[in-house]
């Protein structure tokens, strides 16, 4: 199924499309796979034509979503994984090589490290810095770094060292780093709003997912506190309480403090770059989706951002989700109609997603007929 192709039931020429814009169904479907499954279900239920726009929130899948939306290309290179092992990773190039998208998970991702090998203290973001450097050497003057899915909690120190910074005790030498990034704009697409420190900070919130026990969490918190103190002394920027600084194990905070990066909510950045607002206004309905709708969705994930923008554009919004952990009031808060693919807690299959989308399509067809 290709974008803007007419599907059965779509009517004659000039019909406004259904814009299908899901995020990934984590652990089940990548965003593009989810978009195709939802599109097939909608077509089967009689809705169309279909336009697909897979999206992301700054975590895994962001590079692919932006490269696809902007018709860019992906370049492969060697980088270090979180444990320092050489791996083949990739970054995206768009806008005639002027802009690049570096996805942290490509090199420094938790998915690359087996459970038994996880090292929450020793894991590094160096490979992410190597990808940023490769993008700059390829000619990029703007680099978007998607901070999510990391195996590390190093505050971005490894990445900054790969870019030329050096740190010794309470001193930071940034001359080479600034030379490397001269004329380059850095933006970090953050999939969470957590600060660097505190109960909601990167160590307490995310390090347990990376293999840290309670004692290790406290050790990492102390390390991040020292890191924030060094950043404040060296640059005047304090990432301790900065919103989004905790994304990517603190990579966002490190790049913000030492490299002058802008921190941006990942979902908003992806939708802006992909031209979502114009596409939504051209559609008669938006259908989004993700693996599970829950309180994290309300904290600014892609589905929440899409629902908000659809409401602002005056376009109805539906969500096909693997499972639904929100109540009717929270649905109304987002002004969204939800169709869950499963209701018994098991992981949604492709067939489940297609059937849920077909149910949405039948509701859309009835709504259209009623209006006519």
Image: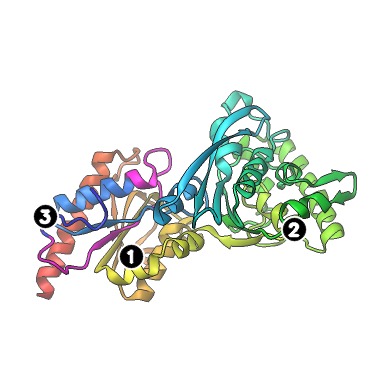
User: Is the residue under label 3 in contact with that under label 2 (CB below 8 Å)?
Assistant: no
Q: Is residue 277 left or right of residue 238?
A: left
Q: Is residue 289 magenta?
A: no
Look at the picture and state if 93 lies above or below 15: above
Q: Residue furthest top?
A: 116
Q: Secondary structure at mark 2?
A: helix
Residue 257 circle label: 2
Q: Secondary structure at mark 3?
A: loop
- The alpha-carbon separation of the residues under discs 1 and 3 comes to 25 Å
Residue 44 lies left or right of residue 126; in this view the side is: left
Where residue 369 appears, x then y in whole percent? 9, 69
**Observer-nearest residue: 216 or 148?**
148
For mark 1, does the 10 Å Cα neighbourhood hold few (<14), some (14 to 19), or many (20 or more) residues?
A: many
Front position among marks 2 and 1: 2
Residue bearing the label numbered 1: 336
Mark 1 lies on a secondary structure that is loop
Query: Is 160 left, or right, of 20 in this rendering?
Result: right
Q: Residues within 10 Å of mark 3 (few under 14, many from 20)?
A: some
Residue 340 position in % (x across, y down): 29, 51
Task: Name the residue carrying label 3.
Answer: 8
Chain part drawn in magenta: 10-33
The disc, 1 or 3, on the residue closer to the chain's N-terminal end is 3
Decide whether residue 18 is among the magenta residues.
yes
Q: Earlier in the sequence, mark 2 or mark 1?
A: 2
Residue at the image point whose x is 69% and y is 62% from the top: 242
The quarter of the picture where the C terminus appears is: bottom left
């Amino acid at each position: 199924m290709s974008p803007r192709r007419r599907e059965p039931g779509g009517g004659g020429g000039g019909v406004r499309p259904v814009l299908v814009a899901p995020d990934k169904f984590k652990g089940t479907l990548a965003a593009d796979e989810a978009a195709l499954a939802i599109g097939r279900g909608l077509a089967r239920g009689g809705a169309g034509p279909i336009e697909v726009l897979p999206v992301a929130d700054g975590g895994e899948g962001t590079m692919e979503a932006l490269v696809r939306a902007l018709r860019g290309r992906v370049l492969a290179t060697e980088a270090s994984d979180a444990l320092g092992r050489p791996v083949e990773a990739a970054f995206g190039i768009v806008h005639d090589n002027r802009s690049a998208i570096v996805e942290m998970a490509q090199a420094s991702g938790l998915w690359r490290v087996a459970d038994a090998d996880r090292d929450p203290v020793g894991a590094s973001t160096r490979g992410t810095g190597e990808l940023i450097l490769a993008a700059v050497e390829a000619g990029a003057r703007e680099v978007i770094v998607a901070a999510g899915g990391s195996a590390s909690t190093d505050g971005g120190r490894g990445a900054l060292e790969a870019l030329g910074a050096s740190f010794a005790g309470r001193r930071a030498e940034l001359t080479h780093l600034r030379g490397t990034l001269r004329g380059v704009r850095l933006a970090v697409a953050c999939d969470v709003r957590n600060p660097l420190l505190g109960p909601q900070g990167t160590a307490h919130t995310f390090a347990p997912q990376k293999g840290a026990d309670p004692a290790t969490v406290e050790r990492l918190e102390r390390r991040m506190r020292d890191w924030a103190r060094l950043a404040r002394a060296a640059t005047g920027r304090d990432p301790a309480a900065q919103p989004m600084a905790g994304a990517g194990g603190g990579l966002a905070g490190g790049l913000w403090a030492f490299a002058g990066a802008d921190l941006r909510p990942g979902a908003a950045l992806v939708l802006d770059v992909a031209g979502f607002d114009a596409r939504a206004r051209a559609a008669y309905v938006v259908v989004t989706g993700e693996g599970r709708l829950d309180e994290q969705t309300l904290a600014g994930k892609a589905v929440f951002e899409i629902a908000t923008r659809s409401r602002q554009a005056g376009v109805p919004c539906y969500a096909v989700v693997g499972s639904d952990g929100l109540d009717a009031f929270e649905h109304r808060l987002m002004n969204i109609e939800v169709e869950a693919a499963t209701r018994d807690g098991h992981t949604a299959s492709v067939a489940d997603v297609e059937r849920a989308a077909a149910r949405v399509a039948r509701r859309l067809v009835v709504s259209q007929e009623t209006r006519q």
